[in-house]
Image: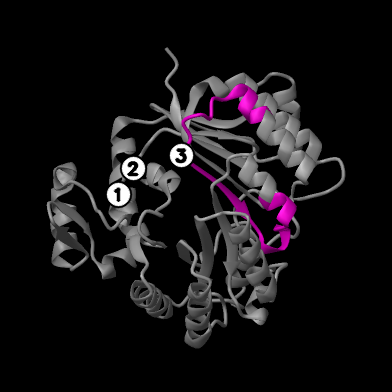
Amino acid sequence: MVREAHHLYIHIPFCLQICPYCSFYKDIAGPGKADPLVDAIIREAELFGHRAAPRTVFIGGGTPTALSVIQLERLFAGLRRHIDLSAVGEFTIEMNPATVTARKASLLRKAGVNRVSMGVQSWDPDLLRLLGRVHDAAQVRSSFAILRSTGFDNLNLDLIYGIPGQTPAQWEDSIRRTMELEPDHISAYCLTYEEDTDFFRRKSTGEFREDVDRDAVFFETAAGLLHDGGYSQYEISNYARPGRTCRHNIAYWEGADYLGLGPSAWSTVGDRRWQNVPDTAAYVRAVQSGVRPLTSEEILPAAVREAEKIAFGLRMNAGVDPARLAANHDLVASLRAEGLLEDHGPRVRLTERGRLLADEIAAALMP
């Protein structure tokens, strides 16, 4: 019997412009690229969609709404032909403020999308230019108003801190202006310098540098302002109003099975993890030939899956059952002694200082 994944991710790599800090697989939208990709994703859903019985769907990228209305309509219709979406409770799509139109918003609502995640990143024009963003503050406000007027009552806005040259005043201003819109969810991510990005190369030459102490101040500023604004932190980078946590992401962090469609998409089902080829043309060729478009596949030892669940679980404010940490007794004792772990009711979680070192702690937990 085929094990079914209850969470579905679809990757649309197209962008209006490549952001110099982004490490996700992306591709500039161009003539003749989008239609074959949409057809290939529908074909992949036909070939492998029997592995999914989704409760959540997340369409990310790239910028999925770089697709035209007609292409989006065909994509949604094809997915519904081959995957049973009747049990989906949360259906998210990522949008760039520059791609929001009333017509697209209406189409998304009719297609069953009930959550939108919009990449604002900053409200400062100079920082937006540095980040390679194609929108401005006016477009954020206009796009947000369009989504609200179309009936979306679950909207997330993404912000980034730790941008080269960013000041505490700029960061606080971005948070306050974001809260003025009263979104239902806010994600506040620390910039990371990922390999194969322009920002990583500029850091390697000494033009940019990381400042851990500054980033810690930015993190604390966000946590304080958002808490005072009625947003509860439920994961290191994520804050929500009551009932508006992202169920899809929580499923990832809790170690649930998920199926990924599209170029570069990852899947984890049972003890198997695989990734689709991060190349749009190669992905299209493989799928249209009826071949699994894989670039890698592995069997995950049970110890690795459990360590991942613990590491991601500790990122959440709810923490983890202390019994799951028994095999890491010495490490746990050390983290407690250093003030990085704390009890939270019957569970254990990272302290505020521990959250600043979450990636290092996660690495230490891996077998």
What's the distance in space between the residues labelled 2 and 3, CA to CA? 18 Å
Q: Classify the position of the C terminus by image quarter.
A: top left
Q: The disc labelled 1 sits on which kind of residue?
A: Gly
Q: Label 1's element?
A: helix
For the residues labelled 2 and 1, say whether their Cβ atoms are less than 8 Å apart: yes
Check disc 1 and report the residue beneath it.
Answer: 313
**Residue 352 in the image: x percent, y percent?**
27, 69
Lower position in the chain sequence, tag 2 or tag 1: 2
Q: In this view of the protein, can residue 292 be seen by the observer?
A: no
Residue 79 among those drawn in magenta: yes
Q: Classify the position of the N terminus by image quarter.
A: top left
Label annotation for residue 254: 2
Check disc 3 and report the residue beneath it.
Answer: 89
Residue range in magenta is 78-105
Callout 3: 10 Å neighbours few (<14), some, many (20+)? some
Residue in the picture at 63% in, 39% down: 111
Residue 320 among those drawn in magenta: no
Residue in the picture at 48% in, 31% down: 54
What's the distance in space between the residues labelled 3 and 1, CA to CA? 22 Å
What's the distance in space between the residues labelled 2 and 1, CA to CA? 6 Å
In the rendered image of this protein, does residue 225 appear above or below residue 196?
A: below
Callout 2: 10 Å neighbours few (<14), some, many (20+)? some
Q: Residue furthest right?
A: 31
Lower position in the chain sequence, tag 3 or tag 1: 3
**Residue 212 in the image: x percent, y percent?**
41, 75
According to the image, what is the colour scheme of the structure?
A: one colour
Residue in the picture at 57% in, 78% down: 164
